[in-house]
Image (spheres, rainbow, N blue to C red):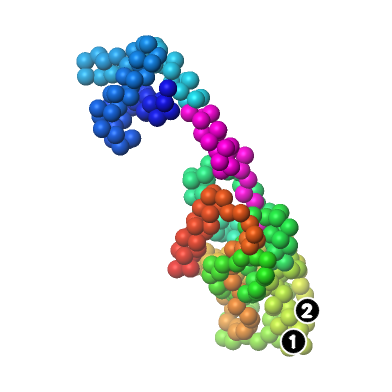
């Protein structure tokens, strides 16, 4: 009994139309008829009966559908197990910052799960690029999204996706929103809402202030970018954030970008994996989807 014949039978059992089955499987209709006849001869029973212009499953045909599905599933499991490409127990562990997880990855994950529904995705939040690099080097991550200045890492393969825009934002009712050009000294007099320590753009911002001999009057640290945004909207302070996380608020006017040139080193979002990493087909597909989706983000 050939697996191909069982697959043809199951398609015909769903469509109850040999012509449609032939189109779906890209066979000649005569081939469909021959395969069904071969199955019937081997089993010694009729699987379909024709009443007028329509066909119906016989009782034997209905019984066969259950077993055919199990046989085909076992055949797929066997092939995956033997070739080492099984996705039945496959895990893909991704590291990413909150901003990437919230604003860019959902669309990527949806596309990937449609392509590989059996692969289990595991996400690990990594707010600092150094943490992501360490996890990649110790094989605790398959792939990581790293938002940082561009750095060479001998053990990792990195690929730049895009350059991030950073903006200093305030509530539209904040007293600074009418200032034409701000200085770092003026910024330091305000309450500054910052992400966790280790965040690349926070580190750069603080280093820039220290180099100028400027020390902020009041700093509040958050673990959540969403919390920072809501506090800025509530006029509790100002914050430096990637533009991608505040685009909607800037368009709607619930946040305002302050006019100041910080002259920080460029921040890039990259994907990275260990140079010695074996890339299974499903991971390669994930990388291809990421490349394609980030092109559309760049256009924005």
Q: Which residue is mark 2?
A: 217
Q: Which mark is residue 224?
A: none
Q: Which residue is mark 1?
A: 211
Residue 81 rendering spot, x and y as whole percentages: 58, 37
In magenta segment, residue 145:
no
Q: Quadrant of residue 273?
A: bottom right
Please say whether residue 144 is visible from this viewpoint.
no
Determine whether, in the image, residue 120 is placed left or right of residue 237: left
Using the image as rendered, state which of residue 172 and residue 39 is in the foreground.
39
Q: CA distance from mark 1 to mark 2?
A: 16 Å
Badge 1 element: helix
Q: Quadrant of residue 87?
A: top right
What stretch of residues is rendered in magenta?
Answer: 72-96
Residue at image position (72%, 75%) is 203
Residue 94 rendering spot, x and y as whole percentages: 63, 54
Determine whether, in the image, residue 43 is placed left or right of residue 288: left
Badge 2 element: loop
Residue at image position (77%, 75%) is 218
Q: Which comes sooner in the sequence, label 1 or label 2?
A: 1
């Amino acid at each position: 009994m050939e697996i191909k014949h069982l697959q043809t039978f199951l398609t015909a059992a769903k469509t109850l139309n040999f012509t449609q089955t032939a189109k779906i499987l890209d066979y000649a209709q005569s081939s469909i008829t021959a395969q069904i006849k071969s199955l019937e001869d081997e089993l010694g029973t009729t699987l379909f009966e024709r009443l007028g212009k329509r066909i119906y499953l016989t009782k034997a045909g209905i019984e066969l559908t259950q077993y055919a599905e199990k046989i085909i599933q076992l055949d797929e499991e066997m092939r995956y197990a033997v070739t080492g490409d099984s996705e039945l127990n496959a895990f893909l562990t991704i590291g990413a910052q909150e901003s990437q997880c919230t604003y860019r990855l959902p669309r990527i994950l949806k596309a990937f799960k449609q392509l590989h529904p059996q692969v289990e995705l595991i996400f690990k939040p990594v707010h600092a690029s150094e943490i992501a690099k360490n996890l990649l080097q110790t094989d605790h991550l398959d792939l990581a999204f790293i938002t940082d200045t561009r750095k060479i890492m001998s053990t990792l393969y990195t690929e730049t996706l895009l350059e991030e825009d950073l903006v200093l934002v305030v509530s539209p009712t904040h007293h600074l929103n009418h200032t034409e050009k701000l200085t770092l000294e003026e910024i330091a007099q305000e309450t500054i809402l910052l992400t966790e320590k280790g965040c690349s753009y926070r580190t750069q911002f603080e280093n820039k202030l220290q180099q100028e001999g400027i020390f902020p009057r009041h700093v509040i640290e958050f673990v959540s970018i969403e919390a920072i945004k809501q506090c800025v909207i509530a006029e509790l302070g100002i914050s430096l954030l990637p533009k991608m996380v505040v685009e909607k608020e800037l368009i709607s006017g619930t946040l305002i970008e302050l006019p100041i040139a910080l002259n920080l080193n460029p921040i890039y979002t990259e994907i990275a994996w260990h140079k010695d990493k074996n890339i299974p087909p499903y991971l390669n597909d994930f990388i291809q989807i990421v490349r394609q989706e980030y092109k559309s983000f760049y256009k924005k």
